[in-house]
Image (cartoon, rainbow, N blue to C red):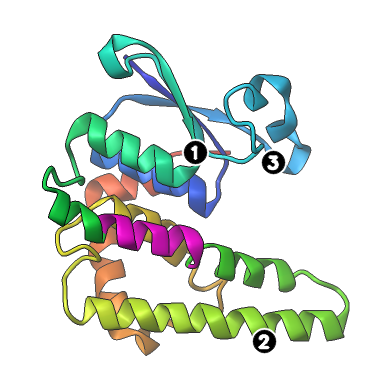
Amino acid sequence: MTIELWTWNTPNGRKISVALEEMRLPYTVKPVNISKGEQFAPEFLAFSPNNRIPAIKDPAGPDGAPITAFESGAILIYLGVKTGLFWPADLRRQVPVLEWLMWQMGGFGPMPGQVHHFLTVENEQDRRYGLERYSKETRRLYGVADRRLAQVEFFAGDISIADFAILGWAWRHERHQVDLPEFPNVKRWYETMMARPATQRGFAVALS
């Protein structure tokens, strides 16, 4: 049965379209135009109460019963457990997946997201302060990623849902004002991920 992906063309939305393609799960896109406030529609709030995309409806959830999920990290874990793909069965191997997934959710998303915001601020003083603060932290996070990827091919060792989560935001590196050659291990990983046919389909599908 087909999963409904309620989303828009954002880094968090792309995490899930990539994961669905990589896991070979059938899905349909239900665009939620966040520029028009469609995330506040009662139908969407009924299963995504924080009025944020993405969210999913899976008619074939646990025990065959329908289930919904919101928050991109929670969706990725759910899909990994559901399929057994990109989610290790062994608890010891799950830990680095969770570490790097939470690293993305708590930092490598919120921080570059603030860069996106301050790039649009009209007041020069406010824009300069915000960009200096959040660009510095964003670059620090790229450095953390680069050091990790000097040790392993993918963030958790083997490719996992953590890579899909991080890729959604690394996809916007130009908007972060980050030149990937400055972080060669991130560049190598990014090019490896973006060369995957399923990942390419996940970025090509229309979300808006």
Q: Which amino acid does label 2 sit on?
A: Glu
Mark 3 element type = helix
43 left or right of 110? Answer: right
- Name the quadrant of the N terminus: top left
Which residue position is annotated with label 1? 206
Q: Earlier in the sequence, mark 3 or mark 1?
A: 3
- Name the quadrant of the C terminus: top right
Magenta stretch: includes residue 100: yes
Residue sitting at 36 percent across and 80 percent down?
A: 144
- Location of residue 85 in the rendering, given as x and y in whole percent from the top left corner: 18, 40
Residue sitting at 62 percent across and 41 percent down?
A: 52
Magenta stretch: includes residue 19: no
- Disc marking residue 132: 2
Q: Which amino acid does label 1 sit on?
A: Ala
Q: Which is the main secondary structure of the residues drawn in magenta?
A: helix
Front label number (2 vs 1) = 2
Mark 1 element type = loop
Q: Which of 122 and 66 is in front in this view?
A: 66
Q: Which of 199 and 112 is in front in this view?
A: 112
Q: Give the range drawn in magenta.
A: 97-107
Q: Earlier in the sequence, mark 3 or mark 2?
A: 3
- Location of residue 106 in the rendering, given as x and y in whole percent from the top left corner: 49, 62
Question: Do tag 2 and tag 1 residues touch (Cβ < 8 Å)?
Answer: no
Front label number (3 vs 2) = 2
In the displayed structure, 2 sits above or below 194; it is: above
Q: Between marks 2 and 1, how big is the CA–CA gap?
A: 33 Å
- Disc marking residue 34: 3
Q: Which of marks 2 and 1 is nearer the N terminus?
A: 2
Question: Do tag 3 and tag 1 residues touch (Cβ < 8 Å)?
Answer: no
Q: What residue type is labelled 3?
A: Ile
In the displayed structure, 190 sits above or below 42; it is: below
Q: Between marks 3 and 2, how big is the CA–CA gap?
A: 27 Å
